[in-house]
Image: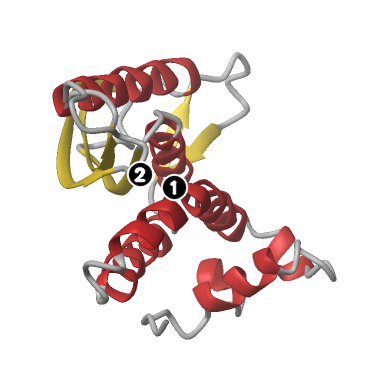
Amino acid sequence: MTMDAEPAGVGASGYTVDDLSAYLDRGRTPAIAAIDDSPECQAMLASMERVGSLARELLAQDVREHPALEEGWLGGLLTSISREVRAGRDIPLASPDPRTSLSITEGAVRELIRAAGDSVDGVLVGSCSVDGDVTTPDAGVRVALTISVVLHSPVQELAESVRQRVYSELLSHTELVIESIDVTVVDVHVSTRTTEGDDL
């Protein structure tokens, strides 16, 4: 599939999304230091691995009915991930030593959000954002993400599971003051594992 990428590649590594996909398919061998040493590339690879099994199930099922799904849906998903793994703003963390400045990148926080959402069974995160002044300690921020779901539970239940999982991870790994977490379901797929008569 063809996707636009910055000339320097993911994380200025010189490697595109397609290159990373091929690297993953080869089992990351032979090792490429420019990829293995790049936090952005590692975040992209981690997202690709999480997307893999669920996306393959959806594509195998849906391509029969909608031949354009793979190019449009999966391509858009990977483009969103590629855009969001960029480092972005530095988010300060408290330090016990006043001479030491600690921070986490906005890209790392977005990957944390994406991983938390993807960890809910049947969910793939499409895009995520952190809105607000993340560079000012104690300033409130708003988190927004879109998800695709495979129905095995009511949609509202899946969205709430994502919201709780994301909140828990942000609370554990950042010092952000979370004002809201908005979860928007943009795609709903009925899995072949779902039998007729199941309550949805």
Q: Are marks 1 and 2 in contact (CB under 8 Å)?
A: yes
Where does label 1 land, which residue?
54
Name the residue located 42 percent from the left edge and 54 percent from the top edge. 55
Provide residue 122's location: percent of width, then percent of height.
Answer: 36, 36
Neighbour tally class for label 2: few under 14, some 14-19, many 20 plus, Cα within 10 Å = many
Neighbour tally class for label 1: few under 14, some 14-19, many 20 plus, Cα within 10 Å = some
Disc 2 secondary structure class: strand
How many numbered markers are drawn? 2
Q: Quadrant of the N terminus?
A: bottom left
Provide residue 71's location: percent of width, then percent of height.
Answer: 32, 76
Q: Nearer the viewer, residue 176 or 59?
A: 59
Q: Is residue 85 visible?
A: no
**Type of the residue with mark 1:** Leu
Residue 8 against residue 169 in the figure, above or below: below
Horizontal side of residue 27 vs 131, given as left or right: right
Q: Is residue 119 visible?
A: yes
Q: Quadrant of the C terminus?
A: top left
Residue 43 against residue 23 in the figure, above or below: above
> Quadrant of the rendered structure where residue 198 is?
top left
Provide residue 184's location: percent of width, then percent of height.
Answer: 14, 39
Horizontal side of residue 16 vs 191, given as left or right: right
The image's mark for residue 124 is 2
Q: Nearer the viewer, residue 90 or 171?
A: 171
**Type of the residue with mark 2:** Leu
Disc 1 secondary structure class: helix
Nearer the observer: mark 1 or 2; the answer is 1
> Quadrant of the rendered structure where residue 153 is?
top left
The answer for how far apart the CA atoms under marks 1 and 2 are is: 8 Å
Horizontal side of residue 16 vs 42, given as left or right: left
Residue 44 against residue 17 in the figure, above or below: above
